[in-house]
Image (tube, rainbow, N blue to C red):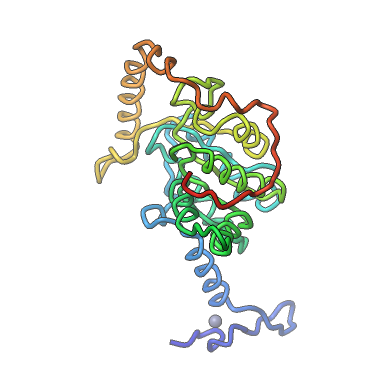
């Protein structure tokens, strides 16, 4: 059916202060925004996420919401991205997607969402020892998106190739001053021996770069996935309290077991070189 305002020309006449002008019709703007949203690769289970359906029922979640709305409202004039940390199911990805959708819909930004493990898998699948074209076809949009969401950082299995690839992406975005939102289930504590620390997962070099690029924001709350279908805020508060109790119990045993593990990343010093050189190729190592 043809648009009733522009008859599908994409242009309509508007009267401004008694003067007739031609303006872009909303149907075209909506179509363009819809295309951009579709190209952002937001997973189906997060596609409904926006600020209006995010429930902030404690101080940390409220603060996180404020950081996220500030970023979305200010975009693209923002100094830093966000690093959202917290236990699984607490709403980190929800907030990241809410920002992404707002800047795509409201600003026409090129936004992109990737689960970190998925991204690495896709890059690895393009491996070709002779020709790196396919690899760059995946990497380029990731490096150049106006806003990139890199979900679940740290969950990937570590290797030298993973380190190199992630550092390449992060450094490219840092150099071009492009905004990135990361989410992670790992705690940001200066502990190289605890496998549950972000530092253990991503190393010194990446962590210090991320602190330059992002505001670190902790989220604490219930696991949304445990919420019954008709559950509300009260249920979330109850679940959150149960979780806090359980995690306190879980952290009681000594950490000697994890401390016995050899730190994987001692070779990286805090001031290690941060060159942009892409050696490429050695996928899957
Ligand atoms: Zn129209």
**Eyeballing the image, is 124 above or below 167?**
below
Q: Where is residue 178 in the image (x, y as percent from the top left)?
A: 67, 50
Residue 79 visible in the picture = yes
Tell me the quarter of the image containing the N terminus. bottom left
Residue 19 at x, y percent in the picture? 75, 83
**Residue at image x 46%, y 41%?**
152
Q: Which residue is drawn at 32% across and 33% down?
A: 234
Q: Is residue 100 above or below residue 84?
A: below
In which quadrant of the rendered view does residue 206 lie?
top right
Q: Residue 210, how many percent across, how many down?
A: 62, 37
Of all residues shown, which one is farthest toward the front?
130
Residue 105: in sight, yes or no? Answer: no
Q: Is residue 25 left or right of residue 85?
A: right
Q: Closer to the camera, 59 or 192?
A: 192
- 183 or 171: nearer the viewer: 171
Question: How many numbered marks does the figure carry?
Answer: 0
Q: Residue at x 41, y 56 (%)?
A: 43
């Amino acid at each position: 059916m043809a648009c009733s305002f522009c008859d599908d020309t994409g242009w309509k006449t508007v009267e401004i202060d008694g003067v007739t002008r031609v303006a872009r019709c909303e149907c075209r703007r909506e179509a363009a925004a819809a295309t951009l949203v579709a190209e952002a690769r937001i997973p189906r289970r997060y596609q409904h996420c926006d600020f209006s359906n995010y429930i902030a029922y404690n101080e940390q979640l409220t603060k996180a919401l404020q950081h996220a709305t500030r970023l979305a409202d200010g975009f693209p004039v923002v100094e830093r991205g966000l690093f959202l940390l917290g236990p699984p199911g607490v709403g980190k990805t929800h907030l990241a997607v809410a920002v992404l959708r707002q800047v795509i819909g409201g600003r026409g930004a090129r936004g992109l969402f990737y689960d970190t493990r998925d991204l690495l898998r896709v890059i690895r699948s393009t491996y070709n020892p002779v020709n790196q074209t396919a690899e760059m076809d995946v990497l380029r949009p990731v490096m150049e998106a106006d806003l990139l969401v890199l979900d679940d950082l740290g969950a990937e299995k570590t290797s030298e190739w993973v380190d190199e690839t992630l550092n390449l992406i992060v450094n490219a975005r840092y150099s071009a001053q492009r905004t990135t939102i990361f989410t992670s289930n790992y705690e940001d504590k200066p502990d190289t021996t605890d496998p549950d620390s972000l530092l253990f997962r991503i190393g010194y070099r990446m962590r210090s770069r991320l602190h330059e690029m992002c505001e670190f924001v902790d989220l604490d709350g219930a696991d949304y996935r445990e919420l019954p279908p008709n559950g509300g805020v009260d249920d979330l508060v109850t679940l959150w309290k149960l979780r806090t109790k359980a995690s306190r119990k879980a952290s009681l045993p000594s950490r000697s077991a994890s401390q016995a593990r050899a730190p994987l990343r001692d070779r990286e010093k805090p001031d290690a070189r941060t060159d942009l050189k892409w050696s490429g190729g050695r996928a899957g190592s």
